[in-house]
Amino acid sequence: MPMRELLHTEFAGLLFRAGVSQAAFADLTGYTPRHVNSWCRGRARVPPWAAALAVVLRGHSPADIQQMVESATMWADGSGAPVTAGCGQPAADGHRDIRGAQPAG
């Protein structure tokens, strides 16, 4: 079931209730503060992923989310090095698709 489009006022309200500034959300997501401000002011549509992340932030800080992302994208084999066995080819942005990856061991 597709997520309904979030109104810009709803998105801005979610960030406010989560205690996350537009600049902090931009830093977390890699977008510019100007992009996030455009979403909050209704000058651009709020992407579904941004709306979902804003909902998640109500229960977690940006630092918590960043730590979860780092944990989910890197399996450690005990040496602290990322495990790449079974991973897909690097994407255009240099990140690897880890779906289905198994930790080494």
Image: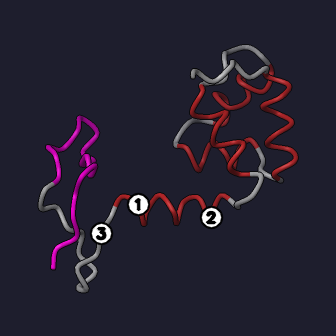
Q: Amino acid at mark 3?
A: Trp
Specify whether 67 is left or right of 5. left
Amino acid carrying label 1: it is Ala
Q: Nearer the viewer, residue 37 or 63?
A: 63
Using the image as rendered, state which of residue 26 and residue 88 is in the foreground.
88
Q: Which residue is mark 3?
A: 75
Q: Which residue is mark 2?
A: 63
Residues in magenta?
87-105
Write the residue at 79% across / 20% down.
Answer: 7
Please provide percent x and percent y for residue 85.
Answer: 12, 62
Q: Label 2 sits on what residue type?
A: Ala
Q: Which mark is residue 62?
A: none
Disc 2 to disc 3: CB gap under 8 Å: no
The residue labelled by disc 1 is 72
**Residue at point 75% right, 58% down?**
59
Q: Could you tell me residue 63's position as x and y percent?
A: 62, 64
Q: Main secondary structure of the magenta part?
A: loop
